[in-house]
Image: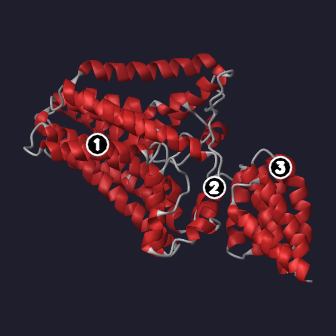
Amino acid sequence: MHLWDDIQLIENNYNLKAVRKFSDIFHFVLKPSKPVSNFFLAWGQWWGHGMVGQHRILSLLLHAAVVFLLYANLHAFRRRLTSDIPRQFPFWVALLFALAPIHTEAIGVTWFRMDILGALFTLSGMLSVQKIGTSRHRLFWFSCLFLSLGLATFSKETFAFTMPVAVLITGWVTGSLKWRGALAIGVAQTFWVGLLLCLLTLDAQSEFPYDDVIGLNILEVPLHLRLAASALFEGIYKTLSGHGLTIVRLQERVGLGIHWGVQGAAAFISLWIGVLGWLYYCGGFLRVWGVILGASSGIYLAIPNMNIGSERYWYFPAASLFTLLIYGIWCAVARFSRRPVRILSVIVLFYAVALGMGLESRVSRMFSRERFYRGEWKRHPEAVATWSDMATVLTEQAKYDEAEKFIKHAKEMDATHPNVLMAEFLLDYHRKNLKAARVTFARIQSEFKHKPQLMGLFHFHIGILEEKQESPAAAARSYLKAMEADPKVNFYQEVYEKNIKLAKGK
């Protein structure tokens, strides 16, 4: 089963389903501003014919490549900057980064692979800039750096900023990049960003099934501060602990999140900026990874939203955070112990085992939706969303009676919750109960009228039920409404025209 975030992306994406030949990979477009992510999404579809396992394997392979490049970068940094740390240091950091449960979201959900790709090409660029100063083949490494800048930028827009900052600070601190090289990187990135801006203008015309959720509102600065502080707090907490809490759960369990006052949020952000500034002041190894952490997490201060602390957003900052964590532990142990390597080995192995245990519990999200959501439901029975999510999963597995019990309980908690209404609609749809689906849809229209993609999908599903009941005229009317709600989806027009012909034939 695909995860919820991939239902529309893969199962209901008719353009992606058209990818059958290898040449189709190069023509598939989901979002014009992310051609690299589009390519790997289509590759996974072609390789696995839409099967979940192949998508997961591809993400795991890309994650393994990120882990290897992280190790290679740390190994190069150790040789050039800090020879006093143990040789095992790069391996420890790479091991913890590989095992952290924080990555299950990015690996388990296909569309979040863009964060893995951005991290992959950023680390490849950092390695390239270090090789420029030591290798005889400078032109080759400059070419790799130029390509890495573009590939990272077109994997995810946020790396258009993070990537050049990470590369420039790496080249500056290691001494492998002079002012001419830095100018060349600036010119190259200006070229890629200019091309990205052109592609972003096409995004509004794409058939991407979700709205980009950006919580930035210039007129609501206090809300902006609280969201940013919550995002940073949760991102750091989840990375180091491996817990899969959301901001909503933090509010429910411990009262944190956007309920922070403006003063508290401002103080936390100031403290974070102060820590990053201190790392920059220390220079050398700390300066590199402190700036990378600041650049990659700075996006949370710029465009915070309610899901910003989740795994998919904190994938790349986690590499910097684990690096600084182990380096800090090493410095503390080395100061007070005669055998710091042995003590540090025990500490890191203990932490790796703890993260591995968390990974075992979270990895079920990648392979078993029912197991994951049932675990979430047992841990948080007070949350309405856990009941509705569980109902949706059971519905997709044709366990309708059990799903109905979950929906009934969720309605007793909050009958107007959007997730509950959607779960009820999906149950009616899978049961092929057209009358009940129409009634439920009438109740949820006001909730989702500002989301044309969802409104289009609701009308589309109603049309499918009407078409199965041999009512092409009614189905055509529903498909027409789907076209009006979301005119960017060409498939709605195709099924509409087909049913119009059937209706005229009768």
331 vs 79, nearest the viewer: 79
Work out whether 54 lies above or below 215. below
Name the residue located 25 percent from the left edge and 20 percent from the top edge. 282
Q: Amino acid at mark 2?
A: Glu
124 vs 271, nearest the viewer: 124
Quadrant of the snapshot with the C terminus: bottom right
> Percent from the top left, x then y, of residue 34?
48, 50
| Between discs 1 and 2, the one toward the N terminus | 1
> Percent from the top left, x then y, of residue 57?
41, 67
The residue pinned by badge 3 equals 414
Binning the other alpha carbons within 10 Å of mark 2 as few (below 14), some (14 to 19) or many (20 upward) gives some
Name the residue located 51 percent from the left edge and 40 percent from the top edge. 198
Q: Amino acid at mark 3?
A: Asp
> Percent from the top left, x then y, of residue 369?
59, 66
Quadrant of the snapshot with the N terminus: bottom right
| Between discs 2 and 3, the one toward the N terminus | 2
Name the residue located 52 percent from the left edge and 37 percent from the top edge. 234
The residue pinned by badge 2 equals 207
- Viewer-nearest of labels 2 and 3? 2
For numbered disc 2, what is the local secondary structure?
Answer: loop
For numbered disc 1, what is the local secondary structure?
Answer: helix
Q: Amino acid at mark 1?
A: Phe
The residue pinned by badge 1 equals 146
Name the residue located 92 percent from the left edge and 70 percent from the top edge. 435
Q: Among all residues in the image, which is located at the extreme left?
A: 136
Alpha-carbon span between mark 2 and mark 3: 33 Å
Binning the other alpha carbons within 10 Å of mark 1 as few (below 14), some (14 to 19) or many (20 upward) gives some
Could you tell whether 48 is left or right of 435 in the image?
left
